[in-house]
Amino acid sequence: MKKAGDLLAYFFDQKTLTSIHTWSKLFSAWPSIVTKHKIAAAESHTRVVEFDRRVLLIEAEHPGWIQILQIKQAELLQEFQSRFPDLDIVGIAFRLSRTPFTPSIQIPEPRPPEPPPTPVVEEDTANLSAKERFKQSMKRLEQSIIARERARARGDFNKEPQRNIKPRSEDAVALSSAWTEIKHCLLCPRRCGVNRAAGERGYCGESAVLRLAAASIHRGEEPPVSGAGGSGAIFVSGCNLGCVFCQNRQISHEAMGREVSITEFVAICLKLQALGAENINVVTGTHAIPAVVAGLKQARAEGLVIPTLWNSSAYESLEALSLLEDVIDVYLPDLKTLDPNLAACFFNAPDYPEYATKAILRMLDTRSLRTSANSTLMSGVIIRHLVLPGYLEATRETLRWFAEHGQGRALISVMTQYTPPRGMGVRVKDAPKRFMSERDYETVLGWLEEFGIEDGFYQELTPDSDWLPDFTRQNPFSSTLSTAVWHF
Ligand code: SF4
């Protein structure tokens, strides 16, 4: 008769055995770690369930436990890092348990970690003439939009817009009222399954009640979005994705904002319209789709006539998107990356590329480009991509995807405003720590040329953080960029 250890040694080599022992210790270390950090009571209500792409996932049986663990998040991460230096742990994520919780600590089968994302070796492909050529192509696009609009104005401009809405999928039609009331939240790909109507909170940290942080007339968006009057931006509190480098982290990560009723949301929309906004631009509202849809429908009934924009991360299910089809005219989705490793590292969402590309394809199917006489967007899709310094290859793949799937159907907006996160805590350990360089910039412009991408926009390079919003202020942005209309 052999001992268990001998049997393992029979099947595995020494390196694999060492790895298994480390993983086993990782999952069983939780009770001693919470005890050491004076939250011993958490032992029977929380558990380590997964370690994937260097992020440790901890389940809790109640949102209150998540809040307690979040307070200690930095300490807990440091503890894990010091105990398991070989695993190169970069973050801790939390979620509510979907199954009945037992006090015993579960030790799941270890899964080998994915290799960490590899920063790109930056090539010197700077080419000024490529930049000039792209600028010219942008000019051509602008002229073609104006020409198309003039043609439309000569003919049937005053007719109702023809929406190319495809039939909803069977999944979407099958949405139950309980689902839309968020009694078992499957609204986004996180699929937390919590009862938000009863105040429970999932990954996004929000109950079913809509919370807003600010509303303003914003003049810093793409030209067809801002137009002459500015875009009526409404900033929703909370976020279902949670990028580590979020520029709006006060509202997306730190819960800034307050609850509003549907009546108040409608009043904000109508005030933005009365002040000359070209559109209503709902920013990061994926986790609040049912409330926003109800609000926009009510606003339409009470006189809202300007177009509505959905400005999101695109980490959205097709079912949730189907709820928007009746109320949204223009989509402004991000396409942050197609690299699951980057998505795991920066948003704790390795499935982001899969969901975001599906969501964007659905948006492309449901909205074709159409502008008004003054060249503001009335319908269509603008795909936004923020270039991450040091990870340029991810941008190249994203541009290639756009050339294949979006060219001729949507506009692209290449954003070069990446700003290293303020107060670099442990969660942002791997986030780029510099602005985009001139060389990065020229490289990206060269790829636009290489892929023949002509329809869209790119920002000028501005290597500073002066434009960053501060949501503690009545007007979170600079007065040249925006006019405050509502603040929490
Ligand atoms: S919206 Fe997404 S993150 Fe928020 S509770 Fe629902 S499934 Fe979870």
Image (tube, rainbow, N blue to C red):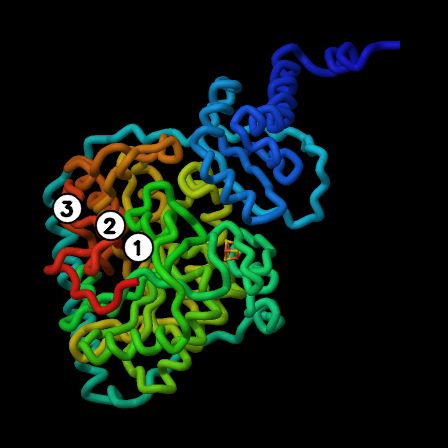
- For the question of whether residue 49 can be seen, the reply is no
Q: Earlier in the sequence, mark 1 or mark 2?
A: 1
Q: Position of residue 171 (x, y in %)?
A: 60, 67
Q: Residue at x 36, y 44 (%)?
A: 397
Say which quarter of the image contains residue 129.
top left
Relative to 386, say whether 376 is above or below: below
Q: Residue at x 18, y 51 (%)?
A: 459
Q: Position of residue 364 (x, y in %)?
A: 40, 65
Q: From the image, tell me which residue sits under label 3.
A: 466
Q: Secondary structure at mark 1?
A: strand
Q: Earlier in the sequence, mark 3 or mark 2?
A: 2
Q: Residue 258: which numbered mark, if any?
A: none
- Nearer mark to the viewer, of 1 and 3: 3
Q: Nearer the viewer, residue 404 or 49?
A: 49
- Amino acid at pointer 3: Asp
Q: Residue at x 50, y 46 (%)?
A: 351
Q: Answer with left or right where residue 360 lies relative to residue 245.
A: right
Q: From the image, tell me which residue sits under label 1.
A: 384
Q: Position of residue 39 (x, y in %)?
A: 56, 33
- Amino acid at pointer 1: Arg
- Amino acid at pointer 2: Met
Question: Could you tell me if the residues under marks 1 and 2 are in contact, i.e. CB atoms within 8 Å?
Answer: yes
Mark pair 1, 3: CA separation: 21 Å
Q: Position of residue 4 (x, y in %)?
A: 79, 15
Q: Residue furthest right?
A: 1
Q: Residue 415: which numbered mark, if any?
A: 2
